[in-house]
Image: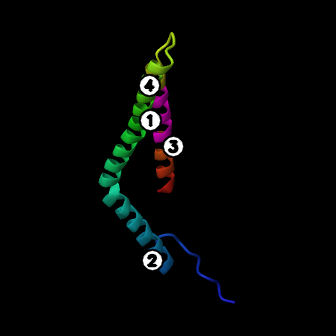
Amino acid sequence: MPDEEKHVPGDGTAEEIGRQAERRLRARRRRSRSVWFGLGMFGLVGWAVAVPTLIGIVLGLWLDRVAPQDFSWTLTLLLAGVVLGAINAWLWVERESRGE
């Protein structure tokens, strides 16, 4: 049996050329969507925090009228909404970054 040639990276074989082309295509896709992807992610993170915060405020105002306490339901639920929204946004960003 004749000695088989060893594959050396960068030697120009079809397999190596295919890998290089695939890397270039992936890089081009990331670059072309980066601006829109970033703007979309920015908006998503904002809404992911704003919606639970607003729900907490509305629910807190209602509870302050219906079931008054020594503490403010509005401030308590506002804080809870911000925390839940931040966790929600963090999980969403984490999931999207794993997808790339």
Image quarter where the N terminus lies is bottom right
Q: Which mark is residue 12?
A: 2
Residue name at image x 38 percent, y 45 percent? 44
Per the model, the C-alpha gap separating discs 1 and 2 is 55 Å
User: What type is the residue that disc 2 sits on?
Assistant: Gly
Element at badge 3?
Answer: helix
Query: In the image, is residue 28 above or below residue 44?
Result: below
Q: Which mark is residue 21?
A: none
Residue behind mark 4: 62
User: What type is the residue that disc 1 sits on?
Assistant: Pro
Closer to the eye: label 3 or 2: 3
Residue behind mark 3: 91
Magenta stretch in the rendered image: 78-89
* Residue 14, position as x, y percentages in the image: 47, 80
* Residue 78, position as x, y percentages in the image: 44, 25
Q: Which mark is residue 52?
A: 1
Return the residue nearer the eye: 19 or 62: 62
Residue 54 in which image quadrant: top left
* Residue 29, position as x, y percentages in the image: 36, 63
Task: Judge the density around disc 4: few (<14), some (14-19), many (≥20) Cα neighbours within 10 Å.
Answer: some
Residue 52 in which image quadrant: top left
Labels 2 & 4 near each other (Cβ < 8 A)? no
Closer to the eye: label 1 or 4: 4
What type of secondary structure mainly makes up the magenta span? helix
Return the residue nearer the eye: 62 or 51: 62
Labels 1 & 2 near each other (Cβ < 8 A)? no
Residue name at image x 50 percent, y 77 percent? 15
* Residue 5, position as x, y percentages in the image: 58, 81
